[in-house]
Image (cartoon, rainbow, N blue to C red):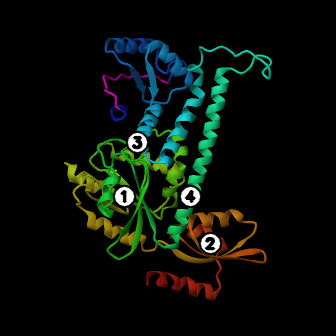
Amino acid sequence: MDDSLCELAELAKTAGGQVVGEGTQKLEAPLASTFIGSGKAEEFAEFCRRSDVDTVVFDDELSPAQSRNLERVFECKILDRTALILDIFAQRARTREGKLQVELAQLQHLLPRLTRYWSHLSRQKGGIGMRGEGETQLETDRRRVQERIDTICDALQAVRRQRDTQRQGRKRSLWPLASIVGYTNAGKSTLLNRLTKASVVVEDKLFATLDPTTRRLRLPTNQNVLLSDTVGFIRKLPHRLVEAFKATLEEVIQADLLLHVVDASHPEADERIAAVNGVLAEIGAQGKPTLMVFNKIDCLDNADALAKRVEQYSNAVSISAATGAGMDGLLSELSSLLRPARQFVELAVPHGASAAIARLHSVGQVLECRYEGACARIKARIPPYLHSEFEPFLVRDESSRRRTDTAPMRQQS
């Protein structure tokens, strides 16, 4: 709880606020009306009045009724963790895609809370074409917000189609894709800059980078790799924010390898690893080949604790993206893990298994597809970890086996 409150304070500072104080209350369950007890709410409200506080931030998501009741008690602005994170995202978004994704999440968060903004307005009276009670201002505003949400969703669908086209173009180059993921402020952008000479903005702040960046990396084995930086994760990451950023996070879903960057100097590193794994599971990227990258070893006091942590994972390296320490070991691991990035297969998929064909197009590189009789004959390259998923459709004749055996050799040459 203390670490979560410290993180909330960092979020508030990142949003431009000045933290005056904090408070906690032990309850078996949050109250439906005010989240915290009425007595504790009055105590905190009195402190806010004495300290001239204009905003109170709660470390959990509040319901619309809770927010409305707390504003009456505190007589100032009430925000929850979700609203605070959305405010930071709104400040950090630079591209049109990023701004659309943030606006969508903000409107979805605002829609059920509109009642408190318009509770002072009465019903409009009917007129010609508007007989009866008419439409309330609240209903009008809700309709406009929903229309804007629909417009943004359509625009983001166009973005996803554009990203899919770009992704298909990258697949034709046969270059594997590695995505950098991790907790916010773990050093992901610094690592991308170190490896690819990119110029991504780097700041010692939470969510310094929102917009994804992809750059080419040439490994010591002369293999080209596409390295993609993504938005950082955080505990209690709002679900609607994950939904809004699906267009961006698809880069993670499509990646051949994940570089999970961890701030090794942070005392709650294990909890942060678990939080990132939770978000990966939510977006459907769990189980992917992962290289654990323990960063910021230059800030460590206890090297023994790091060694024990690294031993827990089959694929792990320790580096300092800021100083460049450990980069040779990282590049060596990348070369080893990405060598079998694609495996040639020939499949015979029945027409009734259209979902399998769609899945193959989304996760693999389809080289040839022709329809013969009751099935589709497909030649493709897929990541090895998906081999078992398509095994029921594998063509097992002798000629295809020879092609399968020789295809990786042709790719390496």
Q: Which residue is mark 2?
A: 391
Residue labelled with disc 3: 92
Closer to the chain start, of discs 1 and 3, is: 3
* Quarter where residue 128 is shown: top right
Q: Is residue 325 above or below residue 262?
A: below
Q: Which residue is mark 1?
A: 292
Name the residue type under label 3. Answer: Arg
- Kindly report the distance in space between the C-alpha atoms of the residues bearing marks 4 and 2: 31 Å
Q: State the extent of the magenta-drawn residues as a range.
A: 16-29
User: Circle 4: is it few (<14), some (14-19), or many (20+) Cα within 10 Å?
Assistant: few
- Residue drawn 28% across and 66% down? 329
Mark 2 or mark 3: whose residue is earlier in sequence: 3
Which three-letter amino acid code belongs to the residue tagged 1? Met
Please report whichever mark, 4 or 1, sits nearer to the chain's N-terminal start: 4
Which of the pair 252/245 is nearer the observer?
Answer: 245
Label 2, label 3: how many angstroms apart (C-alpha)? 44 Å
